[in-house]
Amino acid sequence: YLNTLNDWLAGLEQLRQFAAGAKLFSVSKLASKKLEDANVKQTTYTKLLNAITGIASAIFGLIIFLLSGFLVKNGLLEISALLIVGNFRFYLNQAINQISNARGHMKGIKKLVTEIDKSAEPVHSSSKDSSIAPAIIKTKSLGLKFSNGESLTYPDLQIKEGEKILLTGDSGAGKSTLFKLILGELKPSSGKIIFEDKNGNQIVPDLRKIGYLPQDPVVFPASILDNITMFNDKLDNKVAEAVKEVNLSADLKKFDEGIDKKLNLDKLNISGGQRQKIVLARAKVHDSDIILIDEGTSAIDQKATMDILNNLLKSKATIVFIAHNFNKKMHDLFD
Ligand SMILES: Nc1ncnc2c1ncn2[C@@H]1O[C@H](COP(=O)(O)OP(=O)(O)O)[C@@H](O)[C@H]1O
Ligand SMILES: [Mg+2]
């Protein structure tokens, strides 16, 4: 159920844009029905088994009662022994009840558990390396074939520490896909991506340490401040500076609540450019050593873009910036 929600909610923007909300409701309803069915099935089994053990236990109890009555009457058994048998019966009964309950649980959710087992994949992580961001990224004979037959191939690239790289090209050339390959969101069909530390040793990096601004950045129904810090108030003190650097100050002055303005995703109450500035500020306060920016300023005017680039490219971080509409002056800011 969560898997389905995750898949669909990730594309919520598109669903909204194309007014396809009904589709979202129908798939989530279907997924939740599976969960509900498993619950119903489990309850049915439990109740049924409870009834059976209840009846069995009553019959058993009756037999013991009659038998012990008979034995006591004929002087073959003392009352104390009878009490012991009663106790024994009580514990036995409890154990049988527990077993039958557990059995009901197991039977009811078996199908779901098998499905979850099948979709689970082992996660391999190297405990030694997994918390470092890569310093150098290289690609070798990288290629990707999509299931619809379309394929992309890349020239061998090298992204060095601290470099400011501008990545341009026609739309559909494979720029966004390159970022997804680097981030591990897509697996290459051929070739490989090599990550190295500062000393050129190959490492298995923690890819979450790479800052990434997707082409279609996601904002949340929360204050602009929270959208920048991503709900981490330890970063609040870095926000003022970041806001200035991404040219968001003038925009914030237009809102009565300023940075505490709550974003409304339904009636989008900020412009596309403001949204990009918020996400750029988010990257800024989170301070990654390496940042991949996919068309991060496409909705921001030229003058503000120039200011933002000037500030952004001053940082020590490695930056790869995808853009297709930069003028010569902007080009020249990059390595
Ligand atoms: N999931 C996919 N299935 C099939 N083709 C895809 C998929 N994702 C991207 N493509 C194709 O790969 C090419 C490169 O896409 P993309 O990297 O988004 O281009 P760019 O960012 O340079 O505009 C496009 O032709 C696109 O149609
Ligand atoms: Mg793209």
Image (tube, grey):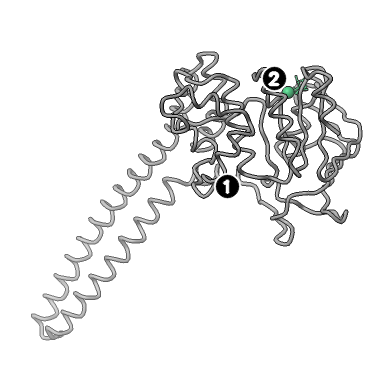
Kindly report which numbered mark, 1 or 2, lies closer to the viewer in this rendering. Answer: 2
Drawn side of residue 218 relative to residue 88, left or right: right
- 74 up-or-down from 133: above or below: below
Q: Which residue is mark 1?
A: 117
Q: Which residue is mark 2?
A: 303
Residue 180: x %, y % from top left: 73, 34
Q: Residues within 10 Å of mark 2 (few under 14, many from 20)?
A: few
Drawn side of residue 82 relative to residue 297, left or right: left
Instruction: Place residue 72 in its image quadrant.
Output: bottom left
The kind of residue tagged 1 is Asp
Seen at 28% across and 57% down, the residue is 53
Q: Secondary structure at mark 1?
A: helix
Give whichever of 37, 133 is nearer the camera: 133
Q: Quadrant of ligand 2?
A: top right
Give whichever of 293, 12 is nearer the camera: 293
- 221 up-or-down from 208: above or below: above
Q: Secondary structure at mark 2?
A: helix
Seen at 19% across and 66% down, the residue is 61
Q: Among all residues in the image, which is located at the extreme top?
A: 18
Whether label 2 lies within 8 Å of ligand 2 gets the answer no
Drawn side of residue 220 relative to residue 132, left or right: left
The kind of residue tagged 2 is Lys
Q: Residues within 10 Å of mark 1 (few under 14, many from 20)?
A: few
Whether label 1 lies within 8 Å of ligand 1 gets the answer no
Seen at 21% across and 77% down, the residue is 85
Drawn side of residue 276 relative to residue 264, left or right: right
Give whichever of 5, 159 is nearer the camera: 159
Residue 188: x %, y % from top left: 80, 36
**In which quadrant of the rendered image does the C terminus lie?**
top right
Label 1 close to label 2 by CB (< 8 Å):
no
Seen at 76% across and 37% down, the residue is 319
Q: Earlier in the sequence, mark 1 or mark 2?
A: 1
